[in-house]
Amino acid sequence: MAAEERSWYQSTRRKWEPRFERIARGWRRYRQHRMGILGLGILVFFSFWALFPDVFAPHSPQWTAYLGTEPGRLTARQVETLPHPPAFGDPFYAPLGTNDYGTDIATLMVYSAETALYIGFAAGILSSLVGVPLGLISGYYGDTWIDETIQRIADITYSLPFLPLVIVLVAVRGITTTNIILAIVIKSWVNNCIIIRGETLSLKERAYVDSAKVAGASDARIVFRHILPNILPLSFVYLAQDAAAAILTQAALAYLGLADFTTFSWGLMLQNIQSRGYIFQAPWWLLPPGIAITLVAAAFYFMGFSMEDVANPQRD
Amino acid sequence: MTRISAKYLAKRVVISYVTILIIMTLLFILLRSMPGNFISGMITPEMTAAQVERLEARWGLNDPLWLQYLRFLVNYQMGNFGWSPTWNTPVWQLVIRRLPRTVILFGGIFILGFMIGPLVGMYLGWWRGSSRDQTVFTGGLLAYSMPVFWIAWLFIWLFNFELGWLPSAYMLTPFPEFELTPLTVIRDLLWHITLPLISVAAVGWVGSMLVMRTQMNNVTDEDFVHLARAKGLSERTVMIKHAARNALIPVATQAIVGIAFIIDGSVIIENVFNWPGMGQILVQGVLNRDFPTTQAIFFVLAVLIVVARLVTDIAYTYLDPRIKFGEEG
């Protein structure tokens, strides 16, 4: 019994060890890129904000300047001081100041991290889930009607103006975060599809694909067992880029007035400062959301381009 | 001389036309699935049911769907875009007046982005791995991650609000005090377009830089580069005349794809700078539920992209001597 268990353990271990080894090798290569480490660090930092906002935020979102969380009314003189510049304890604690309603900017910043990361990851993963299989199929059946059909669809999608399409789709379906993500994915899968197709076209000419074919492997087995593992790193590169683009698109939509007003988001903060006319009066309100959007999007780009080197090592 | 056969040209034109037809079909489906319809913007609570009915009949909304679709296809190809309830003019006139303005902005962004990007990419790719490359590349990606409207606000704050050098809105001075001659108008236009262009260029140059950098790095080890160096040419000549020229071809491909993305930038920037182009009325149309305008602007932008892609595609096949389209093979 024990011997059997050990042999099961050993065979599993033998099966998985090369994969762990490959991941470890990739990680060692990735670690050489200062940019990639920086991106990962930024992402981890904002992930903490997204996961535990109540720990990092100085106040709860219901908090208002002067009043705290108590119900009540601001006096006219207090309202005049809003949006309030950064204050540390006198008359209240708001490290990044407040907006014109008296909500703490730092609190809003922390609570908005979740939306940005959610949109980034969801849009990136979804466009990979659509684009990668289509690219694989299109590449594997290159120069057949299947390939032709997929490429025509991709071509038409490329010809659609992206932002106008997203604007119209969001207007049609209603302004919610989910619809924004779906609208982004409708366009952004194309990039993944084209790149993966090109890679598949070259991979399927390799000798190991031929030997798999001779050994009697089915098309599905060749595509998923032999080609897919080789294009996975590359697909992560484009996942990261899609995520960054999605975050920027959400900000742009929010600026145009198409933000989900029921959730916190950095784009919405920027839209608010514009619609209430404080762009040039309240830099403590204008700068942080933009910097945060830039940092998160850049983190995804940094990771993407570092992974590209892992996936496709350049000559030194 | 001409490498492009008439057959190839015809094929490209037909494909572009079919693409436009498919886009129109998508547009029709999309807008029919939108809540409300063409007349919801005109209905007021005081209207009686009979009046609403009359409006519906006038706009042909009681006809069968296939007839509406057919009418839509024919009308749109004749340039008959209907009547805009928000601006109370034929949509066609809105488009005609605003299209050139969008094209001016769009063209400026396109030219500027593809002048700076490949140039920087050339240097970075040639010295890939150096600390200067790392710094500029990281900085470029950081710039690429900035929301365009936000960086535009910062520029407005600096150049308009603080320094007062450049105007922050409109395409021309609204009530000009100077004499209107072509020269002064062009100068006024350039003065107004500077800030929008700088804002978009600050972000937009990175896209082509990334492609150029990769391509440049790929050609550094090619035989013809070594040959050029062996001939005793200076490093600079090798880089510019031999390596960069070959690396530019995929950048041109990327430019074709990038056209659709520049449209996005111009939609946003038109709203930030109150540029009286098509992106501005597209957004207003969507927010006001002005269906005819939204539909027409979307269509015109799509046609713009298809046409731009067709033109660059043909120019590109013409410029690259290695591509021989239209000949069998």
Image (spheres, coloured by chain):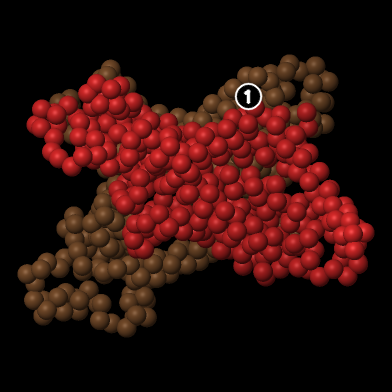
Q: Is residue B311 above or below residue A307?
A: below
Amino acid carrying mark 1 in the image: Gln
> In screen coordinates, is A238 left or right of A198?
left
Q: Nearer the viewer, residue A213 or B109?
A: A213
What residue is pinned by disc 1? B134
In the picture as drawn, the residue positioned furthest to the front comes out as: A1
Q: Which chain is red?
A: A
The answer to whether one can see residue B193 in this image is no
Q: Name the residue: 33% across, 67% down.
A: B34
Q: Badge 1: few (under 14), some or many (20 or more) residues near its Cα, within 10 Å?
A: some
Q: How many marks are shown on the rendered structure?
A: 1
> In screen coordinates, is B13 left or right of B25?
right
Q: Quadrant of the C terminus of chain B?
A: bottom right
Mark 1 falls on what kind of element?
Answer: helix
Chain B color in figure: brown
Q: Name the residue: 75% across, 34% down.
A: A28
Q: Position of residue A154 (x, y in %)?
A: 57, 59
> In screen coordinates, is A264 left or right of B244?
left
Q: Is residue A138 above or below residue B268?
A: below
Label 1 marks a residue whose chain is: B
